[in-house]
């Protein structure tokens, strides 16, 4: 039998591989090489002996993590916030994309696209200071410009935890709506205009066209985006949950997530072993959730599953 000739890499394919190389190197350095340090979660780190010289302690770091009750709190906060974020990102993004496509003409569309991207462009550091400018107790805009003139008592926002689930959700939606809107808008613009013309000839109203044409054709994008966000459901926006609440201890029960818990364990307590155990727990459970979610999608709609 004659062996098949190996396919030569064309110049076009070589150019594409070269473009992929920086991202691939970053992925290996940032995501795969650190996986070698997973053994730290099973050690009792002694700084005098070093990482490799420190004794093994089995599952004690995990036992300490789950026995304190912190695991339940950080898991609850991370999951519930991310579930709300996933739903609102999709609803707000799809709604604004359809409105932008239906109402705004071609001249204004570029302007609104830039405006919508501004929250994404502004870094979370700036967002945190903007939030502080609104929420500060003595000089905050809300207390001085809204509550006091209306005769209400000023609120000490950074010690009142009952407001923070709503504050964090609002800031996250404001920060991400530009990106999600433009992503869905790109899908809406790509829909064949002849479908709307045919529906219009058949007497379908604009709302009916959106219901029976736009939304069904947006379904693959919505499913893909949801699965990608579910893949990060055990990770949280560190800037949102650490910088915006200004690291206030009074708010830990509603702002503490796995990422901020790991950071505080490292910086405040110096407990490397327990921080590594929390990060390991975060990765494993997140991985399982991705597999389960993708498996459900495969059973319902195989063509839209990620793998």
Image: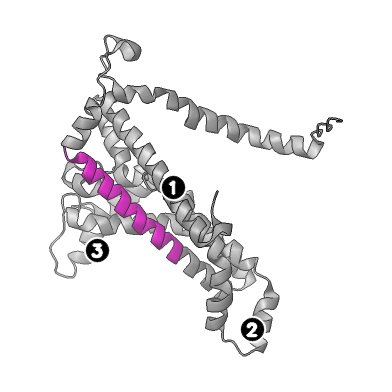
Kindly tell me whether residue 231 is visible in this rendering: no
Q: How is the image coloured?
A: one colour
Residue beneath disc 2: 199
Q: Is residue 158 left or right of residue 32?
A: left
First of labels 1, 2 by sequence position: 2
Q: Residues within 10 Å of mark 1 (few under 14, many from 20)?
A: some
Q: Is residue 88 magenta?
A: yes
Pair 2/3: label in front: 2
Q: Which residue is mark 1?
A: 290
Secondary element at tag 3: helix
Q: Earlier in the sequence, mark 2 or mark 3?
A: 3
Q: Position of residue 212 (x, y in %)?
A: 56, 78
User: Which residue is tagged 3?
Assistant: 145
Q: Is residue 195 above or below residue 241?
A: below
Q: CA separation, marks 1 and 2?
A: 38 Å
Give the magenta-colored segment's residue range: 68-91
Nearest-to-viewer mark from 1 and 3: 1
At 56% across and 86% down in the image, what residue appears? 205
Residue at the outermost bottom position: 203
């Amino acid at each position: 039998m004659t062996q098949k000739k190996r396919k030569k890499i064309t110049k076009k394919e070589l150019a594409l591989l070269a473009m992929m190389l920086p991202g691939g190197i970053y992925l290996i350095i940032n995501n795969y090489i650190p996986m070698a340090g997973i053994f730290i979660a099973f050690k009792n780190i002694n700084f005098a002996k070093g990482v490799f010289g420190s004794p093994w302690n089995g599952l004690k770091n995990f036992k300490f993590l789950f026995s304190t009750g912190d695991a339940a709190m950080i898991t609850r906060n991370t999951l519930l916030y991310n579930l709300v974020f996933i739903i609102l990102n999709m609803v707000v993004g799809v709604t604004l994309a359809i409105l932008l496509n239906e109402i705004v003409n071609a001249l204004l569309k570029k302007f609104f696209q830039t405006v919508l991207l501004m929250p994404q462009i502004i870094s979370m550091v700036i967002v945190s200071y903007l939030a502080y400018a609104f929420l500060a107790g003595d000089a905050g805009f809300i207390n001085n410009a809204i509550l006091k003139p209306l005769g209400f008592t000023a609120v000490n926002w950074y010690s009142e935890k009952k407001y923070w689930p709503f504050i964090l959700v609002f800031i996250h939606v404001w920060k991400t709506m530009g990106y999600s809107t433009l992503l869905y808008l790109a899908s809406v613009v790509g829909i064949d205009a002849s479908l709307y013309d045919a529906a219009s000839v058949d007497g379908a109203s604009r709302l009916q066209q959106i219901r029976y044409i736009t939304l069904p054709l947006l379904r693959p994008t919505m499913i893909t985006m949801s699965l990608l966000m579910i893949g990060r459901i055990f990770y949280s926006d560190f800037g949102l949950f650490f910088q915006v609440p200004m690291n206030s201890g009074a708010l830990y029960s509603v702002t503490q997530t796995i990422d901020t818990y790991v950071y505080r364990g490292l910086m405040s307590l110096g407990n490397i072993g327990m921080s590594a155990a929390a990060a390991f727990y975060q990765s494993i459970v997140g991985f399982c959730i991705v597999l389960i979610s993708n498996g459900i999608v495969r059973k319902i709609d195989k063509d839209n599953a990620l793998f």
